[in-house]
Image (spheres, helix red, strand yellow):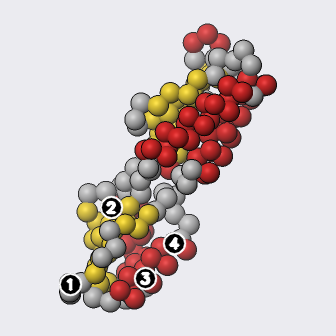
Amino acid sequence: MASESSFDVVSRVDSQELDNALNQTRKEIENRFDFKNSKTEINFDGKAITLISDDELKMRNVVDVLKTKAVRRGIDVKAFDFGAVEPAAGGTVRQVVNIRSGIPKEQSRPLLAEIKNLKLKVNAQYQDDHIRVSAKSKDDLQKVIVALRSLEFELPLQFVNYR
């Protein structure tokens, strides 16, 4: 049996679920009466979603449908970084939605400080784009997970590789 147990704190979006949410959004927009004869498009290049619509009102409706479908597919809306609505060609408007993936070094510091403030016998360290938490006691690791889930953090957090 291993002497230390560990888990990783990550922030990522399941690409298949995101693709399903985008397809459901496209399908609903095609069937909605208020989008008939509209130039609304949803494009995804693997890193960012580009929304194009006729005007800002329709753009807000597209964003609402996207958020609803994403939440139903288990994607936290915090993973979306909505850009500004800007004018595009042909009298349309465009909005770019970046997908947040990984925990940047600057944003990991409050998490590491929170883990340290718990005063448990755990070791937390930042590695690439995730945080590895290890301890001899699995109960301490469970307490860390509970504490991090209770935080209001700007990124969605998942806990993986629990061993």
Q: Amino acid at mark 4?
A: Arg
Q: Quadrant of the C terminus?
A: bottom left
Earlier-in-chain disc, 1 versus 4: 1
Which is in the foreground here, disc 2 or disc 1? 1
* Left or right of residue 36, residue 1 in this image: left
- Residue drawn at point x = 65 percent, y = 17 percent: 39
Residue type at tag 1: Ala
> Which residue position holds label 1?
2
Image-quadrant location for residue 34: top right
Percent from the top left, x then y, of residue 122? 31, 84
- Report which residue position mark 4 lands on: 149
Label 3 or label 1, whichever comes before in sequence order: 1
* Tag in front: 2 or 3: 3
Answer with mark 2 or mark 1, whichever residue precedes in sequence. 1
Dots 4 and 3: beta carbons under 8 Å?
no
* Side of 82 relative to 12 (left or right): right
Q: Which residue is mark 3?
A: 142
Work out whether residue 24 or residue 126 is closer to the camera in this orientation and state it.
Answer: 24
Choose mark 3 or mark 1, whichever is in front.
1
What is the crowding at mark 3: few (fewer than 14 residues within 10 Å), some, or many (at least 20)? few
Given the current orientation, which residue lies at the most extreme right position? 33
How far separated are the C-alphas under marks 4 and 2?
16 Å
Q: Estimate the spatial distance between the alpha carbons at disc 4 and disc 3, rounded to whole Å.
A: 11 Å
User: Does residue 153 sit above or below 32 in this rendering?
Assistant: below
Residue at the spot 20% in from the left edge and 86% down from the top edge = 1
Left or right: 79 with respect to 2? Answer: right
Most extreme residue toward the top is 90
Identify whether 148 is placed above or below 66: below
**Residue 160 at what x, y percent from top left?**
37, 66
Above or below, comparing residue 33 to residue 106 in the picture? above
Give the distance between the C-alpha atoms of the residues marked 3 and 1, in whole angstroms.
17 Å
